[in-house]
Image: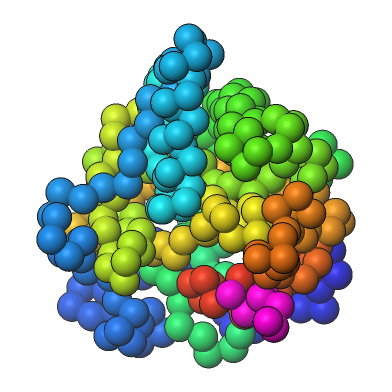
Amino acid sequence: MSNNQPEWPEPIIRVQSLSKSCKDSIPERYIKPSTDRPSISSSSCDDVDANIPIIDLGGLYGDQDTQASILKQISDACNEWGFFQIINHGVSPDLMDKARETWRQFFHLPMEVKQQYANSPKTYEGYGSRLGVEKGAILDWSDYYYLHYLPLSLKDYNKWPAMPPSCREVFDEYGRELVKLGGRLMKVLSINLGLEEGFLQKAFGDPGGMTMLLPDNQVPGLQVRKCDNWITVKPARHAFIVNIGDQIQVLSNAIYKSVEHRVIVNSDKERVSLAFFYNPKSDIPIEPIKELVTPCRPALYPTMTFDEYRLFIRMRGPRGKSQVESLKSPR
């Protein structure tokens, strides 16, 4: 990927370290404008128990009526929410717990060990603490670790932590299971759009266009925008939270929605979550599917490769859904 920014514009400070040293206040660089600050009390206008849909995939390959019900639930969630939770999805609960706790152990290793995997803006792969390269930008209160699972040409075990000892083994198995799960979901999304079941997968040339999140099982934090309100997601036990990515919104010509979301910071407890980005092949042009473009619903987006989109995001940092909205073709 072409990127002229070789290093971060400012010295990197680890948020995990800051959280231990900041007793009464935090640096101004991490304080967002009041209008952008999440609140644990944010919810739907009238329903304090509101939550994103929880869908049981257990009957996906059962009788026709059960299949049809699950397909409709997913279709409704993609149209109305852009988010849904899935249970009975086929991934071992033990593996899910092991994956989350392995990463928790990594973040509790000594700083000098973690620093060996410090990342750069070139690929973002490794141990990081900021997104975007805008100097002086307001930063997120989080550290992360980003690595490539596929394609094999990008998979570099030197970038994978050697500690804890089980890390590489656990995440190879976790990656295999998530790729299989993502493939099943992509077939469902294709069918619900009236396309051949392998259409979206072929259009991406690789996994593509959604995120499967394994949330912290003790500390909620994810908020999803719904009807100009923010709803705090209540994770179901051993569920994955699925959200539609910008590329699927573009391919579906906005039939499926990529919805703005954010995370609440907990002042008392750390929060560890795993986001599996099921992204498209980097050089394949992404544009509205011709079968979904009509005179009444013309193409809303221009053609853009995932590499071009990723560079667009990295240069500007996270800005809600302003990125995908700014890509819309003039009407």
Q: How is the image coloured?
A: rainbow
Q: Quadrant of the N terminus?
A: bottom right
Whether residue 156 appears in this view of the structure is no
Residue 96, quarter of the rendered image = top left
Q: Nearer the viewer, residue 117 or 277?
A: 277
Helix, strand or loop: magenta stretch: loop
Query: In the drawing, does residue 325 fall left or right of residue 286?
Result: left
Please count the marks in the image.
0
Residue 200, quarter of the rendered image = top right
Q: Nearer the viewer, residue 126 or 226?
A: 226
Query: In the drawing, does residue 300 fall left or right of residue 44?
Result: right
Pick out the residue farthest to the top: 63
Whether residue 51 appears in this view of the structure is yes
Q: Quadrant of the C terminus?
A: bottom right
Q: Residue at x 24, y 41 (%)?
A: 218
Q: Residue 175, how many percent across, how many down?
A: 62, 31
Specify whether residue 167 is painted magenta.
Answer: no
Q: Residue at x 15, y 49 (%)?
A: 49
Magenta region: 325-331
